[in-house]
Image (cartoon, grey):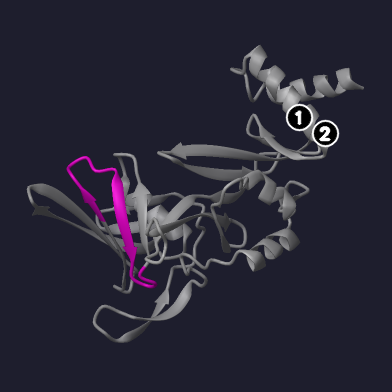
Amino acid sequence: MKTCFTLVLLFLFSAANAQVSEKEMKKHLEKVAKSKADESVVRSLDTIFNAGIPYAILKEKKVMLATDYTLFSLDGKELVNIPYECVEQANNSSNQVCYHAFLFLQSGKRGEMQVGVGMKVERTIVNYDMVRNNDINPAGENKFLMRYPPKFSGVQQTTTVVVVNNGTAGTYTTVDRNRNGSISLFGTELKQDFKTIGSVTKSTSSSNGILIYTVSYFLPNGTKIAEATGEGINCKSWRVVTMKDNQSYTITTTFSQQEEQLAKFLSDRYYL
């Protein structure tokens, strides 16, 4: 039985992990065996195991000291984006609070779980039974969202009555589209799913000899939704302030297509 179990695991992962060494594979098999023996949750070779049985795929991306995750079904369907985010909080000793946002792609809903000592994303996913039959389990999603609503970012709806820049009340309505599509910038217009979802303006200024780069984002009706500022010609770290809820985020981008990357951040959180 043990030999059969080992051969099955080797078959499952040999193609996807062609660069895995014999030592790494041995360590992986030990983790899976321990998961089975302890009936515990482990993550190894990008796969979540529950009591030794493959549950889902959880890939990670390191960004400085933070880790973003993406949850996939075992057959490769993207289910949840799980970025690491921080917002300013004056009554906190570090002046900020950090959390993992769970962005459920099918429903468009969002939950936020504060980062804590010993917290494991893979354990949370299994504990809330988020995946069943290679898809999101609606009951597990709802249970998680009831426990962890978006209390840090305040992003709960795509349509909200807000005070616009000219001081008058207006309706904050984003464009209905497929949010999984790539975002492209054509001149000043942002497009996704072949629809214009907003626009950007760019400007530069100088402070104490340092170049300040500012990108402002607007809905199609002209409502300003966010402003991103970065320092230096090759800036990769941006401070993003949102107009709807006055939240502040620190975002890291690559050098190319920075405006689109910032737009995707705003779109994923239903600001845009």
Residue beneath the point at 74% across and 56% down: 137
The furthest residue to the bottom: 168
- Say if the magenta span includes residue 233: yes
> Which circle marks residue 53 in the picture?
none
Q: Which residue is mark 1?
A: 32
Q: Position of residue 184 (x, y in %)?
A: 36, 50
Taking 38 as reference, is 127 above or below it?
Answer: below
Q: Position of residue 261 (x, y in %)?
A: 37, 49
- Judged left or right of residue 41, residue 106 is left
- Say if the magenta span includes residue 114: no
10 Å neighbourhood of mark 2: few (<14), some, or many (≥20)? some
Residue beneath the point at 71% across and 64% down: 143
Q: Are marks 1 and 2 in contact (CB under 8 Å)?
A: yes
Q: Tell me if residue 48 can be seen.
A: no
Badge 1 element: helix
- Judged left or right of residue 153, residue 163 is left
Badge 2 element: helix
- Judged left or right of residue 58, residue 154 is left
Residue beneath the point at 41% across and 54% down: 265
Q: Tell me if residue 263 can be seen.
A: yes
Comparing 59 with 87, the one in front is 87
Q: What range is drawn magenta here?
A: 229-246
10 Å neighbourhood of mark 1: few (<14), some, or many (≥20)? many
Comparing 249 with 8, the one in front is 249
Q: What's the amino acid at mark 1?
A: Val
The furthest residue to the left: 209
The image quarter in which residue 41 lies: top right
The quadrant of the image that shows the C terminus is bottom left
Q: What's the amino acid at mark 2?
A: Lys
The quadrant of the image that shows the N terminus is top right
Q: Which residue is mark 2?
A: 36
